[in-house]
Image (cartoon, rainbow, N blue to C red):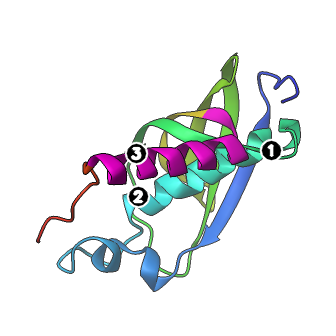
């Protein structure tokens, strides 16, 4: 990983489709507006885009914390843009301010953290943990809904 400068910025845009709406994504009785988890995904993608140029081949970054407010509804067909700015770098831990807009109107804002990972090592560790759970009989079980 190259040194990530404070103030590095990234963005990510998404045209809101029916599958991004709260009434389809979470609960059918909700109004047909942009779902908060999808807004968070837009913000997380903006944060990753802010640091992508500083990652070495085989590296990525996974989210570790999200603290956002969603304060305006957005209907289907609108373009939502997430923006992120690096506010702190502590080794592999990166912190961001994030926001989401629809046109010039702010619809959400907050903070987000990511940690830089070596993807191959991360995947190997997941595989080893899954194998250990299976061998020890502690594999997670599905719960009936």
Q: Residue at x 80, y 32 (%)?
A: 8
Give me the C-alpha separation between circle 3 and circle 1: 33 Å
Residue 64 lies within the magenta run: no
Give me the C-alpha separation between circle 2 and circle 3: 31 Å
In the rendered view, does 59 fall on the left or right side of 84?
right
Q: Residue at x 88, y 27 (%)?
A: 2
Determine whether the residue tagged by mark 1 lies in a helix, strand or loop.
Answer: helix
In the rendered view, does 136 fall on the left or right side of 75?
left
Circle 1 packing at 10 Å, graded few (<14), some (14-19), many (20+), is: some
Q: Residue at x 38, y 50 (%)?
A: 71
Determine whether the residue tagged by mark 2 lies in a helix, strand or loop.
Answer: helix
Disc on res. 37: 2
Front-most of 141 and 44?
141
Disc on res. 132: 3
Q: Which residue is mark 1?
A: 52
Residue 115 position by quadrant: top right
Which range is magenta?
115-136
């Amino acid at each position: 990983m190259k040194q990530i400068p404070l103030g590095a910025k990234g963005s990510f845009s998404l045209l809101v489709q029916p599958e991004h709406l709260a009434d389809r994504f979470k609960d059918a009785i909700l109004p047909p507006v942009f779902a908060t988890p999808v807004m968070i995904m837009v913000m997380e993608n903006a944060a990753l885009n802010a640091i992508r140029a500083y990652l070495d081949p085989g590296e990525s970054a996974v989210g570790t914390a999200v603290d956002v407010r969603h304060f305006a509804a957005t209907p289907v067909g609108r373009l939502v843009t997430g923006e992120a700015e690096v506010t702190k770098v502590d080794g592999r831990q990166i912190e961001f301010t994030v926001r989401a807009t629809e046109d010039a109107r702010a619809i959400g804002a907050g903070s987000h953290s990511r940690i830089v990972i070596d993807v191959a090592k991360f995947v190997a560790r997941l595989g080893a943990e899954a194998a250990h759970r299976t061998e020890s009989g502690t594999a997670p079980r599905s719960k009936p809904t």
